[in-house]
Image: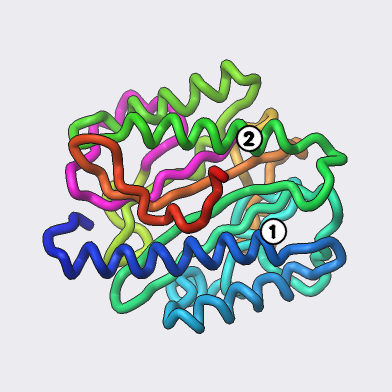
Amino acid sequence: MSITSDAELLGMQAVSEAVGITLRKMREYASPGMSAKELDEYGGRLLNEMGAKSAPKLTYGFPGWTCISLNNEVAHGIPTENKILKDGDLINIDVSAELNGFWGDNGGSFVLGNDINNHKPLVDASKLILQKAIREIRGGVKIADIGHLIETTAKKMGYRVIKNLVGHGVGRSLHEEPKEIPNYYDRMNKNRFRKNSVVAIETFISTKASYAYDMGDGWTLVTSDGSFVAQHEHTIIVTDGQPVILTASNQIWE
C-alpha cells in the first residue's frame, strides 16, 4: 500500500508496533526446556491483548499464532508441543498480524542461551545485511539493486542467500505489490521502490544452501543439505531519504 493520509499512517504504526512488541517479548520469554507451542501461545496472548489478529492463521489457516522455526528449519515452522527449545538453538520467530484493517510483518533469528553451536556469526550477518539494505532503499531505487546488495554482501561474508523466500509489499493485506523483493540480483525485475509505499524487507542468509523446500508437513521449509539460515525482517515506509522503520519496537538490531 501507499500511505496517503494520517489515518493510514497511524493504522500502520499501530499494527507494526503490535507485531514488533510481540516479537521482542517472545524472544525475551523463550527459554530452554520450553515448547514452541508454549512460546507461540504467549505470542498469541500478546497479540490478542493489543487487539491484533494473527495474519498466518487469519489468511492461511496456519496451525499457530506465529511461525517458530528451529535450527535447520528455515521458515514457517509449526509451533508444536514436541518441539522443545534447547540451549544453543538457532530460533526464528516470524510475527505478522492484522489490526483495524492494517497488516504488519516482522521476524528475527537469535541464539537461545549460550552460543554452543556457533550460530551467532550467521545471526549477526543477517542483521547487518538487513541494515545495509534498508539504508539504501528510497523512492526510485531498483528492487533488483537491493537484491544485488544483499547477495554480494552475504557472499563477501562467506554466506549465500535463499532465493525462493522474498520480501514483499504489505499494508491492506499480508502480501501486496511488489509481490517479490528478492535477496538476490534478478535482472528481469525492472520494478522500483515507490515513495510512500509500505514494504516488508527480509533477509534469508544461509551457510550453504540457496533454496528452501517443504519438509512434508505443508508448511515448514528446510534446506536439503542441513544448512542453517538466519532471517531478519522489518516493515518500512519508503521515502525520498532514509526509510521509516515501522517495526523498530522489535529491537532486532539491539
Q: Nearer the viewer, residue 248 or 214?
A: 248
Q: Residues within 10 Å of mark 2 (few under 14, many from 20)?
A: some
**In the shown orientation, is residue 241 left or right of residue 70?**
left
> What coloring was used for the rendering?
rainbow
What span is colored magenta in the figure?
A: 181-205
The amino acid type found where label 2 is placed reads Asp
Please state which of residues 61 and 231 is positioned toward the viewer in this rendering: 231
Question: For this view, does 174 lie left or right of residue 226?
Answer: left
Secondary structure beneath label 2: helix
- Residue 95 in picture, x, y percent from top left: 52, 63
The percent coordinates of residue 224 (x first, y second) are 72, 40
Residue under the point 50% across and 82% down: 48
Q: Which residue is under mark 1?
A: 216
User: Where in the figure is residue 18, as x and y percent of width and height?
Assistant: 44, 69
Quadrant occupied by the C terminus: top right
Q: Which residue is mark 2?
A: 124
Amino acid carrying mark 1 in the image: Gly
Q: Earlier in the sequence, mark 2 or mark 1?
A: 2
Up-down relation of residue 37 to residue 28 (above or below): below
- Image position of 1 with respect to 46: above or below: above
